[in-house]
Amino acid sequence: MKVLFTGIQPTGLLHIGNYYGAIRNWVELQHKYKSYISIVDLHAITIAYDPEDMRKNVFDLALGLFACGINLERTILFIQSEVPGHAELTWTFNSITPLGELERMTQFKDKAGQHRKNVNVGLLDYPVLQAADILIYKGEIVPVGEDQVQHVEFTREVARRFNARYGDTFPECQAELTANPRIMGIDGSAKMSKSKGNFIGILESREEIWNKLAPAPTDPARVKRSDPGTPEKCNIYSYHQVVTPEPELTRYIAHGCRTAGIGCLDCKRKLLDNLMQVLDPIRERYHDLSGKKKEIRNILDRNAEACRKVSGQTILEVKEKMGLTPVWKV
Ligand code: AQP
């Protein structure tokens, strides 16, 4: 069975961009591959944060992922900082990574722009840690949203470089995208993102979501109810394409928009109904799981232990190949 690895940052509430752009895929793929999913807290500390929030966010994220359908039997869900090998492998990869490659990364440039007062080395080194996350389990399949594809390409390059210098060790992984790899934020101007505050959270109530949807921009051509529009220019329609399960209903909405047969508010109400059909059960499962904190903590402990074992073997192999074998072994 091929190994799947993916990660998610505990930086706040899960949103529908995470769900439709990535998590839904993880739920499906866990039946096909040996799956590791990491709550990547070491990545999350590269931006300013409150330690108390971090502890809470990590646990909430574990609950959220289980509520979305990550299966306890099929997936090893674990907390990155509980497995020291990730940081150790990062250091060895640092020594084969040209600085210029990291400086060119789109996410680094974006985040450095967003956090001008805190452009730390961790922010720059983020892709190297991500490469270590994946390769320490010899991951081959990396299901992510479109924003992470460049980092997966970079990981392939790290594996190639390491293998060329020290001998065949790591597979060349590939990114696996969903049908909707880039969900836009509620105002349609940038990708949906926790830090930009332009998201619909998967645990939000019907009312909270409606308060975001109702004022959200649609096709600017539709000023009055009777104005025809172009669905492809409407962000709400792009959500329908992701959320609305029946193609017939999506076609009906597209037709209604073109012919002014349906108003933008009605279109949003239909979207809300369809969205709540998916989110209501997730929220219920989340609340059920909130009462089982001890069991969840035990699972995370067990999983971290399993990961320390597997990653420890890779670290030994890497050290041996790099001439870092302890003297007592020579
Ligand atoms: N808008 C999105 N569309 C599709 N996929 C997305 N992902 C995130 N946003 C979208 C994918 O979700 C997975 C986990 O994301 P993450 O939290 O680790 O990464 P992120 O991109 O940093 O999430 P945010 O919400 O965008 O956080 P900030 O605001 O900190 O940048 C990844 O597979 C990601 O591709």
Image (cartoon, rainbow, N blue to C red):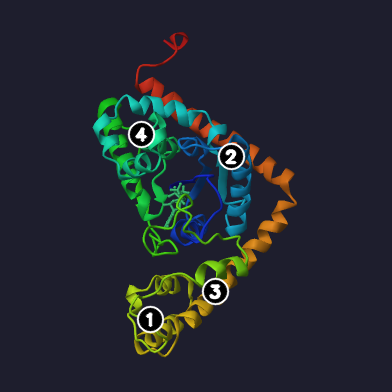
Residue at (37% x, 73% y) in the render: 234
Disc 1: which residue: 223
The amino acid type of the residue labelled 2 equals Met
The amino acid type of the residue labelled 1 equals Val
The amino acid type of the residue labelled 3 equals Leu
Question: Residue 244: horizontal and vertical position, in percent?
Answer: 48, 75
Disc 4: which residue: 124
Q: Residues within 10 Å of mark 1 (few under 14, many from 20)?
A: few
Residue at (63% x, 67% y) in the render: 280
In this rendering, the count of numbered labels is: 4
Q: Nearer the viewer, mark 1 or mark 3?
A: 1
Q: Residues within 10 Å of mark 2 (few under 14, many from 20)?
A: some
Tell me whether circle 3 and circle 4 mark residues in contact (CB < 8 Å): no
- The numbered mark at residue 272 is 3
Quote the CA–CA distance across marks 2 and 3.
Answer: 31 Å
Disc 2: which residue: 54
Given residues 38 and 49, the one toward you in this image is: 49
